[in-house]
Image (spheres, rainbow, N blue to C red):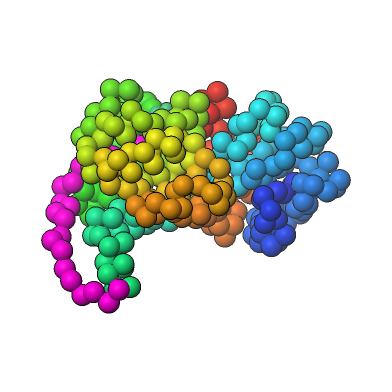
Amino acid sequence: MTCLIAYHDGDKTDERQHGWQMRLTAYLPGCQLVPLADNAADDAEIALVWGPPDGRLAELSQLKLAVSLGQGVDHLMVPGKLPDDIPLIRIVDPDMSHALSQWVILAALDHLRDGPMYREQARQRIFSSHSQRQTRGLPLAVYGMGAIGSMIATRLADIGFQVHGWSRSERPQAGVITMHHGHAGFDKLLSTCQLHVCILPLTDETWHIFGADAFAAMPRGAYFINGGRGAQVDEAALLQAIVSGHIAGATLDVFEHEPLPDNHPFWDESRITIWPHVAAQTNPETAAQQVADAIMAMQAGHVPANLVDRQRGY
Ligand code: NDP
């Protein structure tokens, strides 16, 4: 089956394109990936992209399907990125949920077991203990209970946290995880949980959802972890909440502007742990089959899986 796929992955195109070409060829022997920037991409039916340049996808006259190279699709929901009539699907890879849940556990336990303090002591050759925080049954909120959030929540419950999940729609209790939704649910979790994990998609509704009021509503000493998107946080408000001592600190993988600018005040705040958007990376090895399945479904006239609801924004 022949199939021309326009490919763009930010500035990392060459090596990754080769990886996708190899993996996709195993399922779609006739497929050919070409860089989105090349004229050859003008006839592509499929776009496999992360952060394509404004207006470029609208130039592909044969385009029938766009595939986000990540689980988040906010990079394609900006006006001018993707024509309204082109269906968009996203990768939903259990390996991403696995990687992100490990990252959240690492961040949560590093804070709760005083990793930064003991690493600093070790740097100074100080062998001295402090009392251990009691973490069993600690109330913890997971904002976003989709493909990734639900795995994070389950695993955090497995290691002894009292886990509360927050979703947009009303959902039944998921095992030992108590579910909440809507504004009332959000306010309740803010005020009752000590650890706050954000793994929401970025939409109009979630933009700056964690602002000054949200941080003020958290109990004193609460900790914030963001693996969702940077623009869900009012960064100045978070910094202020940490500097004032109300919030104990934060571990952040995502930022409103990436790469995080050199002069950003987060770099100078030791209570903020910065990760360069690596909590979970798309892996062609585990994701290629579902991309191929989506292309074959589209070519057969069926609706592919993991279709993004463009009205809802995720
Ligand atoms: P899903 O679409 O599967 O789940 C999204 C969840 O968020 C759903 O539970 C949804 O509610 C909830 N939600 C959405 N909007 C709202 C709202 N306004 N109020 C309350 N809840 C809301 O997404 P994934 O789990 O696959 O991915 C989540 C996000 O993780 C991605 O969009 C991306 O931004 C981020 N991500 C980050 C990575 C990293 O490396 N840092 C890697 C991969 C993804 P409902 O269940 O009712 O629909």
Name the side, left or right, on which 18 lies relative to 116: right
Against 100, is 242 above or below? Answer: above
Is 133 included in the stretch rendered in magenta? yes
Name the side, left or right, on which 235 lies relative to 136: right
Name the side, left or right, on which 285 lies relative to 62: left
For the point 62% across and 36% down, which residue is it?
76
Ligand 1 lies in which image quarter?
top left
For the point 30% across and 73% down, which residue is it?
124
How far from the left and from the top, in percent, is residue 4? 78, 47
Query: Magenta region's main secondary structure?
Result: loop
For the point 80% across and 36% down, which residue is it?
60
**Which residue is the extreme one toward the right?**
39
Q: Quadrant of residue 288?
A: bottom right
How far from the left and from the top, in percent, is residue 108? 30, 53
Q: Quadrant of residue 23?
A: bottom right
Most foreground residue, 83 or 87:
83
How far from the left and from the top, in percent, is residue 118? 26, 66
The answer to whether residue 23 is seen in the rendering is yes
The answer to whether residue 94 is seen in the rendering is no
Is 21 included in the stretch rendered in magenta? no
Give the magenta-colored segment's residue range: 124-150
How far from the left and from the top, in percent, is residue 240? 36, 38
For the point 48% across and 41% down, which residue is it?
230
Most foreground residue, 206 or 168:
206
